[in-house]
Amino acid sequence: SQTIHQWPATLVQPVGSPLSLECTVEGTSNPNLYWYRQAAGRGLQLLFYSVGIGQISSEVPQNLSASRPQDRQFILSSKKLLLSDSGFYLCAWGHRGVRYEQYFGPGTRLTVT
Amino acid sequence: KNQVEQSPQSLIILEGKNCTLQCNYTVSPFSNLRWYKQDTGRGPVSLTIMTFSENTKSNGRYTATLDADTKQSSLHITASQLSDSASYICVVSPRSGANNLFFGTGTRLTVIP
C-alpha cells in the first residue's frame, strides 16, 4: 500500500529564516506530487505540482519554491520566511494521469513569528 | 469564475443525530466531485467521489448526493458519532485543465455527547 510522509509535523520559525519541508511517498512509482497551503478558515490553495523529477509547476507566485530531486520526494523551500507564510502545509500524491485522485499527507503546521 | 461554496460554515449536533452538509459549485465543465474529511491538524481523507453521471454514493454512514443540473451536492451523515467531529471539504474537478482542483472552505462539524 502507498504511504505519504511529511516532516516536520510542526515548525516555528522567525521571519527571515529559511524553510525546508519534506514530503516522501512510498509504495508507488512516478506519482504526481502536490504542495498545498491551508490558511485558517480558508480552503486549500495549490502552490506547486510536479509530474516528474525536476518538473515543477507553480500555481501562485510567492516567496516559496519547490523541488523534486527524486521520483518520490518533494521539497518545499523558502530563502526568507514572511509572516504571511504561516499556515498548514499539505503534500499530496496522485496516480500519473489521474488528476483528481489525490491522497494527502499528515501536514506540517508552520508558524512564522 | 469557478467556485465551490459550502454551507453551513460550522455545525454543532448531538451524538446520534443526523446532519446534512451542502456544496454548491460553479465549476464548468465538470468532471467529478469528492467529499473529504479532515480531522484537526491532519490531512484530508477521501470519503466519496462522484462523476457527473452519478446521483448518490455511500460510504458507511456517509451518503453523498449530486445534482449536476443544479450543481449541488450534499453529504448526509447518519447516526453521528463523536469521531465525526471534523471539517468536511467539497472538492470539484473540472473536465479540462492540468492539475487544478477547486476546494470549498469546508464545514466544521462538532458532535457533542
Image (cartoon, coloured by chain):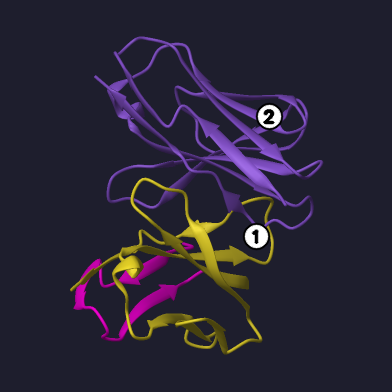
Chain colours: A purple, B yellow
Residue drawn where x is 66% and y is 86% of the image: B53
Q: Which mark, by number, is residue B4? A: none
What amino acid is labelled 2 in the image?
A: Gln
Q: Do the residues indicated by labels 1 and 2 lie within the same chain of the protein?
A: yes
**SS of the residue at dot 1?**
loop
Q: Which range of residues does the magenta coloring cover? A: B1-27
Neighbour tally class for label 1: few under 14, some 14-19, many 20 plus, Cα within 10 Å:
many
Neighbour tally class for label 2: few under 14, some 14-19, many 20 plus, Cα within 10 Å:
some
Q: Quadrant of residue B58?
A: bottom right
Q: Which residue is mark 1?
A: A100
**In this image, A99 relative to A52: left or right?**
left
- Residue B9 located within the stretch drawn in magenta: yes
In primary-sequence order, the first of circles 1 and 2 is 2
Q: Quadrant of residue B90?
A: bottom left
Work out whether residue A1 or residue A57 is closer to the camera in this orientation and state it: A1
What amino acid is labelled 1 in the image?
A: Tyr
Question: Is residue B113 visible from the viewing direction of this image?
Answer: yes
Q: Position of residue A30 (x, y in %)?
A: 81, 41
Q: Position of residue A20 (x, y in %)?
A: 51, 19
Does residue B3 sit above or below B64 in this rendering?
above
